[in-house]
Image (spheres, grey):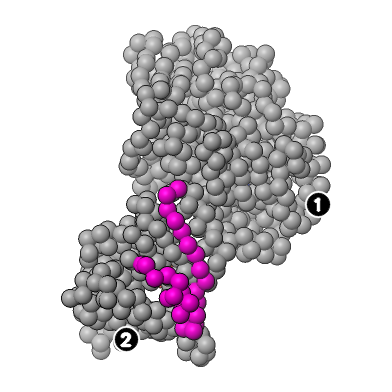
Amino acid sequence: MRRKISGWGLYPEVEAEVFMVKKRDELMEKISSVQNIIARGLGRSYGDSSLNDHVLDFSKYDFFLGFDSEKGILKVTSGVTLDEILRFAIPRGFFLKITPGTKFVTVGGAIASNVHGKNHHREGSFSSCVKSFKIVVGDGEILECSREKNSDLFWYTFGGMGLTGVIIEAEIELKKINSVKIDYRGIKAENLDEVFKLFEENANYTYSVAWIDCLKGGKSLGRSILMLGEHADDGNLTLMDKKEIAVPFFFPSFVLNKMTVKAFNTLYYSKQIGKYSEKKMDFDKFFYPLDSILEWNKMYGRRGFFQYQFVLPEDRSFDGLKEILEEISGSGYGSFLAVLKLFGEEEAPFSFPMKGYTLALDFPLSEETLQLAEKLDKIVLKYGGRHYLSKDSRMSGDIFKEEYGESMKFFLKVKERYDPGEKFSSIQWRRLFK
Amino acid sequence: MKVLVVGANSDVSRELLNLFAAEGDDLILLSRDVENLKLLKKDIETRYEDVKVEVDYLDVTDKNSFNPIFDKFKEVDCLIYIAGYLGDNERALLDMEEAEKILNTNFTGAVLFINHFAMEFAKRGSGIIVGFSSVAGDRGKSSNFIYGSAKGGFSVYLQGLRNYLFKKGVKVLTVKPGFIATKMTENMVLPKALTASPQEVAKDVFRAIKKEKDIVYTKWFWKFIMLIIKLIPERIFKKMNM
Ligand SMILES: Cc1cc2nc3c(=O)[nH]c(=O)nc-3n(C[C@H](O)[C@H](O)[C@H](O)COP(=O)(O)OP(=O)(O)OC[C@H]3O[C@@H](n4cnc5c(N)ncnc54)[C@H](O)[C@@H]3O)c2cc1C
Ligand SMILES: NC(=O)c1ccc[n+]([C@@H]2O[C@H](COP(=O)([O-])OP(=O)(O)OC[C@H]3O[C@@H](n4cnc5c(N)ncnc54)[C@H](OP(=O)(O)O)[C@@H]3O)[C@@H](O)[C@H]2O)c1
């Protein structure tokens, strides 16, 4: 059926033929009969990576295919969500090894974006928990990929944004846990200098992420709260039933203006009173604070918003971030959510993470914020950093090509090998790779 | 409990199966697409290790294929008939094959299949029969009256059967959904407020089974919508474009 769709940022919106994937033979027939196809999971990527003329919607292709409880290896079809996996895994004493900040993503989407979590510095990105997957390539063949088999396709599919083919099944490895709770520790940092130090001192924590108040300038530039966590060990593996609430309508766009963002950030920072705070937290609250508000993206109004996420190489992170935060606080267009995180080494060759600091920001869509973003792009490039494709809807092809350089050229070779006829493409592909 | 589902590949069925499996009930899945049933079986047996799932081919429009099924599956506690075919009303008016398929899937096949188990359950003095009818069977309207009449016939059959089996200790539940967002309706534009998700319907039906209800409308307010629609005098109704 033809309908209008968009990514999580609600921009851009396009009309597409959306095909619900239900059965494998119907899928194969569809792939052989049309061009300009892209796979889509739950549409939690912010920009245009899952948009094209023909969209294969995998959200209903969600079957569990087997579980080896000794090894903790779960086999699923690609539309299974991380939420479903957690419901299955937690009562059995398992957890996702890698999870992004929302559990409403599919396994296919997690592979294609090679998502990262709060533990990237210790456990890598999603590729590190994927044993193998099956993918349909350009000529309609189904290939099994792993570190041993078709390994070029295996590696370049991580971060490949659905452009190497359509993932239909995957085997992923879960990790053992002994509690649904997280032992949380929060530390306030006065400025960027301090939060960098704290990240390094606490590198042994499995999970770490900092929330930054990016409206603060001067001496308090980089004022933040570092949030650390470990799985608790109390043996409680019972899932609680939670009620989700939905943002019922589009907020008028004046609701989120400079003043409200400032008030929110001040409140957030002062919520924690002392320098340190420790508590036991439900895993949902620690990993997925936004998931309890369904459709929170509508808060930004009908025009939508964009996320701005980049990473800078470790040795140049401090200077680069300082320059970027100064630019933002100077502009006054603070972001509601600004999240800072230290990445470790990345094993997948065409993926966003690299050893260094990453910052993610939200901006409501407007001429001014788009101009600000273009200024920031130049700083990111100057410091040798790059942007995350899953969040991007606006960067120029030139910036992207410079940022990804050699690894993009290798990616294109693999793409040429497995999809020479460009069966698979997306709006993002045409915007950035062409 | 052992639950047999006819038309197990339906989107609503999938949700319903999860609810039974979560209680540890064993399942028998019947439908035409056996490949898909096998996928469902794998899915359920992975999520619920202690549940046993059997699958088999059944085309409800082919009564000659019923006997092997009757012979194979003898111990059943709950029979759910959820197979359905909406079809194309305009086409059905011109094409006998289409009309027959609608009638057979939603009515004739249902009656012939359920009769056998009704008698088995009656002999044993226990059992539950659940039939998926539709609000479309409550009043005939121009857009889908071939389907509607089959569902209407099915509703009357279930009503009589409930009456017939009451003293024999067998329960009969009639399910009357309004709109459900499933593959049956995926190319239709449905009013969001009136449309249920397959999960919602499954939950309503599961609760109705547990509470031994006779009829369940889902979403619940369809009961009142249909009450009003049924009250409209025919001389007015016939002029309305429904
Ligand atoms: C609140 C929120 C927090 C987030 N936090 C993080 C985070 O901490 N870390 C992080 O890394 N990301 C994060 N993200 C981004 C999100 O994890 C990724 O965009 C993810 O890829 C979305 O998965 P999806 O199933 O919704 O896929 P979609 O958004 O539908 O698609 C994303 C990409 O995957 C491809 N794809 C989807 N399914 C398949 C398939 N079966 N075969 C081939 N390609 C496929 C699409 O073509 C597209 O390129 C966050 C997003 C939100 C909304
Ligand atoms: N969706 C709605 O809005 C709505 C509204 C009111 C009532 N209902 C009724 O509710 C029930 C479930 O609906 P749904 O939307 O979940 O339907 P659905 O997803 O379209 O599923 C119907 C299932 O019936 C099976 N089936 C069809 N013909 C068959 C045959 N000849 N023999 C055996 N199985 C057959 C099909 O499986 P195979 O292809 O594997 O055979 C199919 O999966 C149906 O009875 C429907 O009429 C639906």
Q: Quadrant of residue A344?
A: top right
Closer to the camera in the image, A288 or A89: A89
On screen, A262 above or below A303? above
- In-image side of B231 versus A117 (left or right): left
Secondary structure at numbered mark 1: loop
User: The numbered mark 2 sits on a residue in which chain?
Assistant: B
Q: In front: mark 2 or mark 1?
A: 1
- Residue B179 x/y as whole percent: 37, 67
Residue A406 visible? The answer is: yes
Query: What range is drawn magenta here?
Result: B49-76
Which residue is drawn at the image coordinates 67% and 55% (left, top)?
A37
**Is B59 covered by the magenta stretch?**
yes
Closer to the camera in the image, B86 or B132: B132
Q: Quadrant of residue A412?
A: top right
For mark 1, what is the residue?
Answer: A420
Which residue is drawn at the image coordinates 60% and 56% (left, top)?
A56
Question: Tag 2: residue type?
Answer: Lys
Q: Residues within 10 Å of mark 2 (few under 14, many from 20)?
A: few
Closer to the camera in the image, A375 or B62: B62
For mark 2, what is the residue?
Answer: B239
- Residue A67 x/y as whole percent: 53, 43
- In-image side of A347 versus A282 (left or right): right
Query: Residue A11 got which mark?
Result: none
Q: Residues within 10 Å of mark 1 (few under 14, many from 20)?
A: some
Residue at the left extreme?
Answer: B167
- Residue A196 x/y as whole percent: 55, 12
